[in-house]
Image: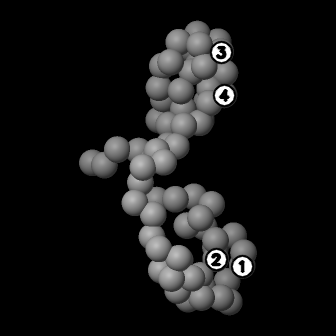
Amino acid sequence: MTAPLSIFKCIECSKEYDIRDIRYRCECGHLLEVLHDLNISIPNASDWKASLNERMGETAFFRYQDILFPP
């Protein structure tokens, strides 16, 4: 299993939660922030362009889903 690309982390106690959990607050009552792994390998620009061009006829949501919701 690979490490998640994003997690929820409490701003007070630093407890971490799975990003797929539906949560708005930590168990301690404080807010959660979303942290993203910025060290992921990012495809080069020509790969992104080719991927988007393959989905040219689809709606914007499906065409850009890899950008909006990385795997």
Give the residue displayed 45% in from the left and 63% down from the top: 42
Name which residue type carries label 3. Answer: His
Residue 63 shows which numbered tag?
A: 2
Give the residue displayed 65% in from the left and 88% down from the top: 56
Q: CA distance from mark 3 to mark 2?
A: 36 Å
Vertical comparison of 68 with 1: above or below? below
Q: Position of residue 8 (x, y in %)?
A: 54, 32
Residue matched to label 3: 30
Residue matched to label 1: 59
Q: Can residue 20 be seen in this snapshot?
A: no
Q: CA distance from mark 4 to mark 2?
A: 29 Å
Position of 28 with respect to 39 (left or right) is right
Q: CA distance from mark 2 to mark 1?
A: 6 Å
Give the residue displayed 72% in from the left and 79% down from the top: 59
* Label 4 close to label 2 by CB (< 8 Å): no
Position of 67 with respect to 18 (left or right) is right
